[in-house]
Image: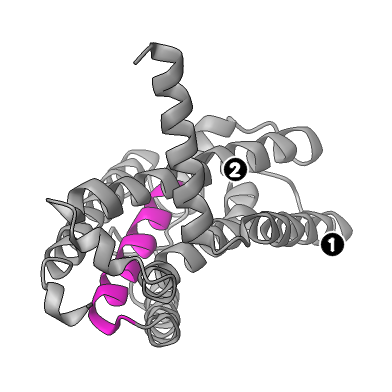
Amino acid sequence: MTFTQAIKMVVKMASYNMKIIFGGKFIWFFIVAFLFFCYFMFQSAYEGLLPSEEMVYNHLSFPALLLVFYPAVFGIQNDADNRILEVLFGIPNYMYKVWLVRLILIYIEIYIMLVIYACVARYLLYPVNPFEMAMQLMLPVLFIGNLAFLYSTITRNGNATAVLIIITGIVFNILSQSLFRQSMWNVFLNPFELPENLHPAIWSNIVTNNRLFLGIGCIIWVMLGLFNLQKREKFV
């Protein structure tokens, strides 16, 4: 097999898996997320708010989570609906060869889309670094996405998983507004939002610890989810 043929095969495999993951609705999620982003931008411009990196991050947070919601929540159910779980469980090391690859594909695609959105914000709102902005947004996306994946391996139902992840998101949001607003435990911490009464060095330390906390959480959620996929009798 030549290098060109290998590349074509990888592209076809990625395209096939993304069609299954998004259920053929990828373009609609892309459009809806972009429309939300545009709405937030025009609303802030209408209200005369001062553009900043903090504002761009806030505007991109909801579209970023929206992009990961469907594939992470309904991924297992889509496999069951398409009757391919039996085939997938017949592959040695199923959890590593299929779903781990799918998660990687999902997050790569979301990162690319966030870079595009950040580029739009760079020209229309504020001169941010698109790659840094997308990278910062990916940590809460990975945390919530992997948690939703874990829930889906437990419930094996998209609607039940959606309810659980929405409730969890509401709890995280309440905690971030009350107890954890300027804490490393805040899942929705804005790294560009420097508090007025806090020294920049202290804030930098909080942000670093927060990103470390999110990274460890991402690894724990995905490992638990992949471990659950070993329980074949619960899925087939």
For mark 2, what is the residue? 113
- The percent coordinates of residue 78 (x first, y second) are 43, 70
For mark 1, what is the residue? 47
Give the number of the disc on residue 212.
none
Q: Secondary structure at mark 1?
A: loop
Q: Which residues are magenta?
A: 138-156
Q: Is residue 132 magenta?
A: no
Asked whether 64 or 103 is in front, the reply is 103
> Disc 2 marks which amino acid?
Met
Sort mark 2 into few (<14), some (14-19) or many (20+) by Cα contacts within 10 Å.
some
Q: Quadrant of the C terminus?
A: bottom left
- Residue at the spot 29% in from the left edge and 68% down from the top edge: 85
Report whether 99 appears left or right of 55: left
Q: From this viewpoint, is residue 126 visible?
A: no
- The percent coordinates of residue 14 (x first, y second) are 45, 41
Q: Magenta span: helix, strand or loop, mainly?
A: helix
> Disc 1 marks which amino acid?
Glu
